[in-house]
Image (tube, helix red, strand yellow):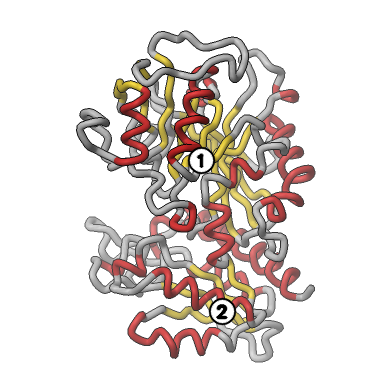
Amino acid sequence: MEQPKEPKFKGALCQIFVRSQPYGGSDKSNNGHRYDSVPFANGMITAGMSCQLIHYLHEDHDAFFELCKAFNFIIVRCNPGQIKADGGDQQKFDDAMRVVRKTGVQIWPSPDVMEKMGAKDALCKVATMNIGLEDTLAYYSPEEFVAGFKKTMAFQPRVIKQNRGSSGEGIWIIKLKEGNYCKEYGERSCEDGEKLSLMEANDNHEEEHTVAEFIEFCVSGRNDKSGEWTSKGVGKYLEGGKAAGGQLVDQRFCPRIVEGELRYNLIVDALVGIIHKKPKEGGISAVGGTGSTYTYYGPEEKLFDNLTTNFLKKDLPHVMPALDLAEEPVPLWWTTDFINSSPEGTKPEEEKWIVGEFNCSCVGISRCLAAYCKEDTPNASWDDISEEDKAEAKKYGDLMGEKALAILSK
């Protein structure tokens, strides 16, 4: 669409063309832009704002960020890892974007929002809400981890999540092999030699280790004391300390994870769709590539009324302040994953769903996937998307434009 002659606000959509990768990255159409940039930009234009597509070049870092200060808003659509893959420095980019944010330019999402919402300890900060579990703990040092984990593990099955992994790597579902859990929390702590049955969420593979070996792997990685590991990961989850993102979150295992999780797709505070992601039989994780099945529901789905009300009406107004982001609006386009924590047989209207993850880090619009280039479709473009999917993507974009305009007009 053409840019408005007198825009209500001036905006930009920031991307990066990864010169070392085919097509400029796995998220690009044949024109070098992200496959889902069209609905974002056109949504802003439909709302009466301008939205120019700009590419970050690390060689022109200073000039690029000087230009950024001329806009009222910037939508950042650089996939994690792409700036580094192109030879740039993600930290340098983030720090410069923080400076731009301080001048009053709205950044969706700002580096702070992306970092704090994406951090696993976000689950601890919402622990007392309807969507949280009160016995969710965060560990930032080996000492905290050893003392806390031995106590929680002795009480009930746990999920231990590292902060820096993706696609389920470093997320462990853990049970005592002997099943000898204590009746009251704190009644006992695990011994170093007790055997653990572990399953990792990235590929649902299983391992068996002692408590001491698991702790050693999490803290120091692979060595003689941690034993033999078949995990694709390297451990060392606390490396660098809190400042470097070294942390572990310890959460109660919810057995009904085998029934899958719900992904809520949101545009600011508006729910636009729900996806039920069910793991392959025998698995626990529903991340892509593990054989999981997806079922799609509309935002008004009665089956999940209880969760929708608890999340959107009761909890959402408190989420950003709880994450130390009180000055920031809710992200423009983001997702939240939920797990059913209720015992089997609970009535749907009484079920308690708890948050497993917030994600606002370059979430894609799946309706546009036909437009990204890959080996068998090297010339994929916007024209390859079906009319039905284009229409749905336009609805998303138009709603983003409406919501963005309302936030900028405050």
Q: In which quarter of the image is residue 254?
A: top right
**Which mark, residue 139?**
1
What residue do we see at 60% from left, 64% from top? 397
Q: Is residue 307 left or right of residue 393?
A: right
What amino acid does circle 2 point to? Val
38 or 159: nearer the viewer: 159
Q: Quadrant of residue 167?
A: top left
Mark 2 and mark 1 lie on one chain; the one further toward the N terminus is: 2
Q: From the viewer's perspective, is 243 left or right of 187?
A: left
Q: In this view, does 337 lie above or below 320?
A: above
Q: Where is residue 101 in the image (x, y as percent from the top left)?
A: 60, 76
Q: Which residue is drawn at 47% across and 67% down?
A: 77
Looking at the image, is 250 positioned above or below residue 363?
A: above
Q: Quadrant of residue 162?
A: top left
Q: Which quadrant is the N terminus positioned in?
A: bottom right
Secondary structure, mark 2, is helix
Q: Name the residue under label 2.
A: 99
Left or right: where 259 falls relative to 342: left
Q: Position of residue 9 (x, y in %)?
A: 67, 82
Mark sitting on residue 395: none
